[in-house]
Structure formats: C-alpha cells, structure tokens
Image (cartoon, rainbow, N blue to C red):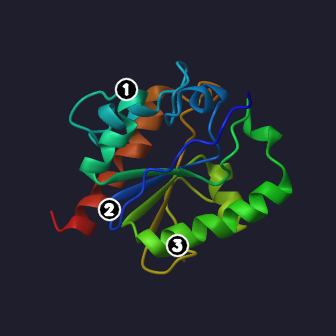
C-alpha cells in the first residue's frame, strides 16, 4: 500500500493559506498536515499568537474555522524535500498559482524559503512579506520551514511567524 497525498484544506477568502513543500511520510500515513512529531508548526502558530490554543495535527481541518487553509507545492509525500523532482515543482507551481487565484486568500504563507523560491522563481528573499507578488493583490509571506530538520531556534521562528498577524488582521479589517 503506497502513501497517498493528503487533502488540501481550502475555502474561499482564507485569512492565511499555508503552503508547504510536500507532506512528510508521517502526514501521508495519517492524512494530516504537519503531522511529524518533530514538526513545530502548531507550536509556532500558538506561540506567535495566530491560534487561541495549541492545536494537534489531527485538528488541522478545524483551522479552517480560523480562516487558515493548507496546501503544498507538491502533493506527493516524501522523507525530505530533496526527493522532489524538478518536474513535480514545475507542475506544482502551476497548480498552486491556480489555487491561489481560485480561493483568493489574504496572505499566502510559504513555510520555507525553498517553497517560495520554487513557486516564484526568485532567490535571495528575506523573511516576511515579499515585494511584487506573483498573484497581484495577495500578500506573499515567507517563513522558515517548521520541520524538525531546520536548526533555527524556535523563538526566532515564532518572531517571523508573528509578523503575519498584521497582514491577516488588515485583510479582515480587524
């Protein structure tokens, strides 16, 4: 039995659409985004003030109620992003742009600089909001990958993610 791609959690007018590289093997096995025990995604969201409590991967669909959606640039689960082929990125880039234009989130948060590089074709970007978005009218925001393989300190990651709040609140008129 092969590991299946996990479903996106999308709806129109999301506050934030989180875009990862691709699902981990654990996410593929469980069907939930950011499910690896070493992944710090939900802890980062909570500590950054983006969620009212600490969510578990099994509750990923519940974040739609907060206006948060999930997708990946590549749907196929793998052990590391290094296993993703150039062809998968090319196809994923087109599919992702179509999803953004269809669902029109206020902020698209790229969970990893490499995800944004593959999507935009740009290099050397800084953390946070990016100038000249690929899809005009959408805030493109780059954050570190929350993977346990990333060696950045949790506090640094939380500080970068917390910057999304200003953009998502502005989009919602709060």
The number of numbered badges drawn on the structure is 3
Depth check: 13 or 30 in front?
30
Decide if residue 29 is in sight here. Answer: yes
- State the residue position of label 2: 167
Image point 60% across, 46% down: which residue? 112
Q: Secondary structure at mark 1?
A: loop
- State the residue position of label 1: 56
Q: Position of residue 3 (x, y in %)?
A: 69, 32
Image point 50% across, 37% down: which residue? 33
Mark sitting earlier along the chain (2/3): 3
Spatial separation of the CA atoms under disc 2 and disc 1 = 24 Å
Depth check: 21 or 49 in front?
21
| Image quadrant occupied by the C terminus | bottom left
- State the residue position of label 3: 131
| Image quadrant occupied by the N terminus | top right
User: Of circles 2 and 1, which is in front?
Assistant: 1
């Amino acid at each position: 039995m092969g590991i299946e791609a996990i479903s996106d959690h999308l709806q129109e007018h999301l506050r934030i659409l989180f875009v990862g590289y691709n699902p981990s093997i654990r996410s593929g096995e469980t069907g939930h985004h950011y499910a690896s025990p070493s992944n710090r995604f939900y802890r980062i969201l909570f500590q950054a003030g983006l969620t009212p409590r600490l969510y578990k991967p099994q509750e990923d669909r519940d974040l739609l109620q907060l206006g948060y959606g999930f997708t990946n640039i590549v749907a196929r689960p793998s052990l590391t992003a290094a296993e993703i082929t150039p062809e998968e990125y090319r196809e994923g880039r087109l599919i992702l742009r179509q999803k953004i234009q269809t669902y029109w989130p206020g902020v698209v948060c790229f969970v990893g600089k490499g995800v944004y590089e593959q999507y935009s074709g740009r290099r050397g970007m800084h953390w946070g909001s990016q100038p000249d978005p690929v899809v005009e009218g959408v805030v493109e925001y780059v954050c570190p990958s929350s993977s346990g393989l990333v060696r950045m300190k949790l506090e640094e990651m939380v500080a970068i993610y917390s910057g999304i709040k200003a953009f998502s609140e502005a989009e919602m008129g709060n």
